[in-house]
Amino acid sequence: MANAFDNLVKDENISKEDPGLRILMIAPTSFFGDYGCHVRILEEARALQRLGHHVTIVTYRNGRDVPGLDIRRTLPIPWRRHYEVGSSRHKIVFDALLGLKTLQVLSRERFDVIHGHLHEGALIGLVLGRLFRLPVIFDFQGSLTEEMIDHKFLQRDGVVHQLMHRLEKWIDHSVQYTLTSSNNAEQILVRDFACDPERIRPLPDCVDISTFSPLSESEMTMRSAERVRLGIPHDAQVIVYLGLLAEYQGTSLLLEAMQKVRSQRPSVYLLLMGFPGIDYYKAMAQNLGVADRVVFTGKIPYEDAPSYLKLGDVAVSPKLSATEGAGKLLNYMALGLPTVSFDTPVAHEYLGGHGVFAQKGDASSLADALIALFDNPNMQEIGEQLRQRAVIYYDWNRSALKIVDTYKKALHSGERPFANRPQVSSVDQR
């Protein structure tokens, strides 16, 4: 590992830090939850610890602990013992408790930098960072207001939307530096929120390329047996999806696409892995007449993700959001799985010229893309090219060095939250 880091430092011309930075990560979610932003938080923390730094994660009450991580949790809410994915009015109370827990931790221990995930984490970091004179780094994984619209929690151009948009812009302008989960996210901050590009550090989602590795010859027998256990013929062609099941993730469109895929390729199965709403989507699959070709597994622990994804021949990501990251694509790539995605900027950024793209929001186009990929004689080569792209551009070890370099710039700048912050006018220019 040490040699690998030394090579990365030399290749990237980044100064390797002396170990010992104490980093407080604020995670406004039920960490760890085996999906999306949770994986980014987990892998960033692990990579920083491999460099010798200490990471403390403050998060909601729920979620499962991860060996090797210092996780501090809030008090529970008596009337809300579970936490659903997405926007919710209950998040206001969750975030208030998160702020109190963060204050408690900061009052008792010394830290060098606050790393706030999502806008809520950055907001808590800004308030408490000013109190404790600590620099705040914002881990931006998509527009707050756009996510709330995606989750049907907010109506575009309403009064509340305008207020939330102004708050989002204020947060974006107030932090020392922002790490973005994609280059597309950087463009959104500059174009839509008038942020200073000098304060933005693109840090695309990455993947653990040693854990997510292609199917080996020795694993072929295991794959056949596991397919049969799940009710899939061992010689079937299998599409895999692993992530949240939700409308903005394109789950309904994927099931609709399976109607056409089933009619033209009866040997193709869909292994649909994730949560929530399993009963709802099972009923939809039944109504669409594809229940015999769709296998639902429910929630898959992150550590089991590679073995389950290796059951597939092709991977799919029908995500509709134009602003959020799409980390699942990187897992697919590292495994060498040829991948179909809707045509979005983030998907193009990750997959490059080796992805197969369908018209966004079009189930028929998605089905055509999947069928065409199965018919492509170069399908295996496409997967190998995606694996190579992941190794070169999306290794968490390389990204950890960039995170530490950003911490260093923030610490050496002498700035603190709200210093030299551009004023957000009362009339929000969008």
Image (cartoon, rainbow, N blue to C red):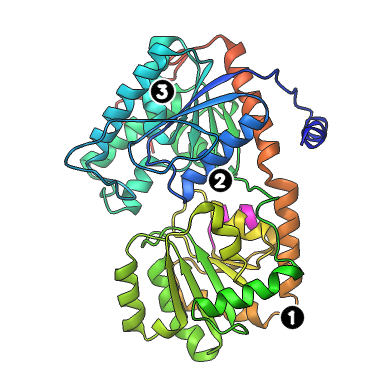
Q: Position of residue 362 (x, y in %)?
A: 45, 72
The answer to whether any part of residue 398 appears in the image is yes
Could you tell which of marks 2 and 3 lies nearer the N-terminus? 3
Position of residue 186 relative to residue 336, above or below, is above
Between the residue at mark 2 and the residue at mark 3, the CA separation in whole angstroms equals: 24 Å
> On the image, numbered disc 1 is attached to which residue?
377
Which numbered dot is residue 184?
Answer: 2
Could you tell which of marks 1 and 3 lies nearer the N-terminus? 3
Q: Position of residue 138 (x, y in %)?
A: 49, 29
- Give the extent of the magenta segment: 343-351
Q: Examine the image and state in which quarter residue 48 appears.
A: top right
> On the image, numbered disc 3 is attached to which residue?
125
- Neighbor class of circle 3 (other Cα within 10 Å; few <14, some 14-19, many 20+) is many
Between the residue at mark 1 and the residue at mark 3, the CA separation in whole angstroms equals: 51 Å
Could you tell which of marks 1 and 2 lies nearer the N-terminus? 2
Q: Amino acid at mark 1?
A: Pro
Q: Check disc 2 and report its element: helix, strand or loop.
A: helix
Location of the N terminus by quadrant is top right
- How many discs mark residues in the rendered view? 3
Q: Position of residue 328 (x, y in %)?
A: 55, 56
- Asked if the stretch drawn in magenta spans residue 341, the answer is no
Q: Position of residue 269 (x, y in %)?
A: 52, 80
Q: Amino acid at mark 3?
A: Gly
Q: Check disc 3 and report its element: helix, strand or loop.
A: helix
* Residue at the (59%, 21%) spot, across then down: 407
Location of the C terminus by quadrant is top left
